[in-house]
Each structure stands twice: as C-alpha cells, then as structure tokens.
Image (cartoon, grey):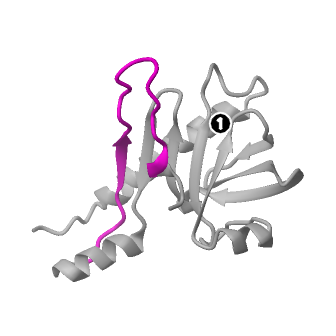
Amino acid sequence: MADDLIGYEQLMQDALRGVVRASLQEAANPRGLPGKHHFYITFRTHAPGVIIPEHLRARYPDEMTIVLEHQFWDLEVYADRFRVILKFSGQPHPITIPLSAISRFFDPSVKFGLQFEQPHQLDEARMVSGEAPAAPAPRATETPTAASDNSVVSLDAFRKK
C-alpha cells in the first residue's frame, strides 16, 4: 500500500470534528438549540486539556457522557475546545472539553451520530494485524430506525458500559 503523504485520515477527522464544533456553535446561540435537537457527548476524561471536577474524574476514570439539552449555561465554543457549565448533584461546575477528547457525538432527535476512534485503539489493532500505525479515523454511526412510532431507540451504544 502506498504511503498517504497528504494525511487523509487526519483531514477527515478534523472535518468531522468541525461538524461537532458547528453543532455546538448552534447551541451557543442566544436562542439555544433549535427544535428538539440535543446532544450526547462522550469524551475521554483523562485526555489532555479536559477540565472537570476531580470527583467526576474519579467516578468516570475513562469516559463520561454529558447531555446538552435544557440545563446548560454559558456555552463557549472555540476552534479546538468548548466550555460549558453543567449541574452535577445539583451544583454548577464549569467543564472544558477539547474536541480531540470527544469519542462520540450523538443527536437523538435526528438519529445522527459520529464515533471517533482514538489513536491508541487504531495503533493497537494495526500492531496485532502487523500493519503500521496510522492517523486516527472517525466513522459515522447509524442508529437503528424505529419500526413504529411506539418503538424505543436504544442509546446503549453511547453509554458507558
């Protein structure tokens, strides 16, 4: 296989993280999220640049999922991260999450999701198979469509196991 000297995997990951950033910017507008849109955002709690209270880091040592729907405040979106105030156990706490720390993004109102593979996962898989490590690649995920209006769509794929 030829070497990818352009870095398509990283370009694709950056582009899809741009989708997450643009979605967060919509939520940061004074009018808030349009319609029934809301976000489940799963991130690696020990990733560089993540700022969360220590009790949450202890409770969620690997990944944590937050929901941006009705009760979030002061959402600020930057080129490489976002900051928001959320309540945990009734107490408001500011948290900062770099876009690179996000492992899953899901908007259940339209069944749209992105899952980002982390560099160490790809490298381990390639080392086992004998391939050379490469840049991380995101993949779009589809949730099962409901068979009828009374069906429940499972969010288990987006929850910590």
Foreground pick, 104 / 156: 156
Kindly tell me whether residue 67 is visible in this rendering. yes
In-image side of 85 versus 116 (left or right):
right
Kindly tell me whether residue 17 is visible in this rendering. no
| Image-quadrant location for residue 112 | top left
In-image side of 123 versus 69 (left or right):
left
Residue 1: x %, y % from top left:
9, 68
| In the image, residue 43 above or below residue 156 | below
| In the image, residue 108 above or below residue 139 | above
| Image-quadrant location for residue 59 | bottom right
Residue 46: x %, y % from top left:
62, 73
Is label 1 in a helix, a strand or a loop?
A: helix
At x 76% / y 43%, what residue is drawn? 75
Foreground pick, 153 / 30: 153
| Image-quadrant location for residue 126 | bottom left
Q: Is residue 145 magenta?
A: yes
In-image side of 140 versus 20 (left or right):
left
Residue type, numbered disc 1:
Gln
Residue 15: x %, y % from top left:
43, 46
Q: Give the extent of the magenta segment.
A: 133-157
Most prominent secondary structure in the magenta stretch? loop
At x 69% / y 35%, what residue is drawn? 69
In-image side of 27 versus 152 (left or right):
right
| In the image, residue 157 above or below residue 32 | below
At x 85% / y 56%, what residue is drawn? 93
Report which residue position mark 1 lands on.
Answer: 25
| In the image, residue 34 above or below residue 12 | above
Q: Residue furthest front?
A: 150
At x 72% / y 35%, what residue is drawn? 28
